[in-house]
Amino acid sequence: MAEKNWGERIPYMDDMVRNWEKRTSGTNPERIDPDSSLGADDRLFPEFTVSSAAWHGLITAVEHTGFVFTALAATRTMYPSAYYTVLRTALLGAAQAVWVLEPKARAERHRRALTIAATNADERRKFVNDLPAATDELRALRDAQAAQQSQVLADIDAAAQRLGYAAGKGALWRLNATEVIKKAAAVDLDPTVRDAPLMFWRMTSGHVHGHAYTRWLQIERDNPQGRERRQLGARHCRSRPGRTRCGGVRHADLDRVEAVGRATY
């Protein structure tokens, strides 16, 4: 899609997203053929299924991407950073689905699904442990919920041992999002564009954390890998009551983010 301009790409991508929304709507995932390789995966560990890990990644990706196109249609505005923060979650969800399904070896698919489950249980336990508990009753409730997640991690560790891993190893597995993006990008992507998802991941991460460099990259006019670039600094910004504008830009227009978008789509 790199040869198409934004006006042509956006309707094309919108159609794809809406089709995926139809596939992922409803309360139940698509039926898994029990005679398929994925069906056999799910029978081994029905409490930590490979299909559930992939399905959650898909519905997350579709929901967040659909929101972006709905917002674009409603506002007709390409906000400089807000869409990137949403698309970061979409990218990770889609990559997670590819990453967990990609291995040819069943044991590795299970290891990846268990890694996702262990990460989820650990993050939920952290959330529970940070809950305020001003009374003994609330502290007991919090501790019970934290113990539930610790038990989930113990169950994951038992499943990992069934796969041949040493005791205690599975409970410590954690998802490395950047590595997931890299591995997913290597699946069925032309080698010339395999770096694009990682570049987009870095851009979206910069926006999520509020780093200024991602805004500068969007506004710079020249190729960042070639000639000397026009850097926007404080001298290019001017303030008025209630508003600060840098380089005369309030909302990055479509042309300004073309360089980033070209690598992504």
Image (cartoon, rainbow, N blue to C red):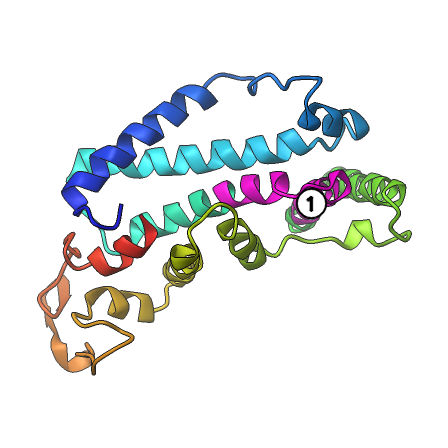
Q: Quadrant of the N terminus?
A: top left
Image height check: is 220 above or below 204? Answer: below
Q: Position of residue 121 (x, y in %)?
A: 70, 43
Report whether residue 77 is seen: no
Q: Amino acid at mark 1?
A: Arg
Prevalent SS, magenta region: helix
Q: Is residue 224 left or right of residue 119?
A: left
Would you name the residue on which mark 1 appears? 112
The number of numbered discs placed on residues in the rendered structure image is 1
Is 212 covered by the magenta stretch? Answer: no
Q: Position of residue 10 (x, y in %)?
A: 22, 39
Q: Position of residue 239 (x, y in %)?
A: 11, 71
Q: Which residues are magenta?
A: 94-123
Q: Is residue 253 left or right of residue 48?
A: left
- What residue is drawn where x is 91% and y is 51%? 167
Image height check: is 123 above or below 259? Answer: above
- What residue is drawn where x is 38% and y is 46%? 87
Who is closer to the viewer here, 195 or 147?
195
Image height check: is 31 above or below 175? Answer: above
Q: Quadrant of residue 240?
A: bottom left
Image height check: is 236 above or below 101? Answer: below
- What residue is drawn where x is 64% and y is 52%? 175
**SS category of the residue bearing label 1:** helix
Q: Position of residue 192 (x, y in %)?
A: 39, 58
Who is closer to the viewer here, 47 or 208?
47
Who is closer to the viewer here, 235 or 53?
53
Report whether residue 29 is seen: yes
Q: Quadrant of residue 45?
A: top right
Q: Is residue 117 left or right of residue 15?
A: right
- What residue is drawn where x is 76% and y is 26%? 46
